[in-house]
Image (cartoon, helix red, strand yellow):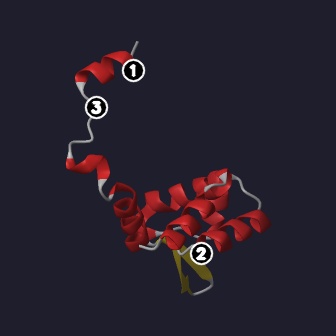
């Protein structure tokens, strides 16, 4: 993945409403959601939702399919996987990323 692609995705997710929309759509997976279902769950006005969906589409985070009169939005699972790999590439220099016990004790105090 190119840095520019990752940056576009992270910029799109860097706004609270868009992040909430994306997380909701990801929860539904390949079933997807229509805009009216998203509005029902999140209470975002239609015009605002359209703007956020467009931004998520421009970042290639979502895929859309027309079914009759409805648009179904689904996560772009391949891009989500690539983003995860991008973030974790060379993670912890090949060592376990789990914090050691002394770190856990300090953190919980």
Q: Quadrant of residue 46?
A: bottom right
Is 43 positioned to the left or the right of 108 in the image? right
Disc sitting over residue 15 in the figure? none
Within 10 Å of disc 3 (Cα), the crowding (few <14, some 14-19, many 20+) is few
Whole-percent x, y for residue 76 in the image: 45, 73
Q: Earlier in the sequence, mark 3 or mark 1?
A: 3
Whole-percent x, y for residue 72 in the image: 54, 76
Q: Secondary structure at mark 1?
A: helix
Q: Nearer the viewer, residue 23 or 72?
A: 23
Label 2: which residue?
Answer: 57
Label 3: which residue?
Answer: 99
Residue, x 59% and y 70% (percent of image)?
34
Observer able to see residue 6: yes
Point out the residue furthest to the top here: 109
Q: Nearer the viewer, residue 109 or 94?
A: 94
Q: Where is the C terminus found, in terms of image quarters?
A: top left
Q: Gap between marks 1 and 2, in whole Å?
A: 39 Å
């Amino acid at each position: 993945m190119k840095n520019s692609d990752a940056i576009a995705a992270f910029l799109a997710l860097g706004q609270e409403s868009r992040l909430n929309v994306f997380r909701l759509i990801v929860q539904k997976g390949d079933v997807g959601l229509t805009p009216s279902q998203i509005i029902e769950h999140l209470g975002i006005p239609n015009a605002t939702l359209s703007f956020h969906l467009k931004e998520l589409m421009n970042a290639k985070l979502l895929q859309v399919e027309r079914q009759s009169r409805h648009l179904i939005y689904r996560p772009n699972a391949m891009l989500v996987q690539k983003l995860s790999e991008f973030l974790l590439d060379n993670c912890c220099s090949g060592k376990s990323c789990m914090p050691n016990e002394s770190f856990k004790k300090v953190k919980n105090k």
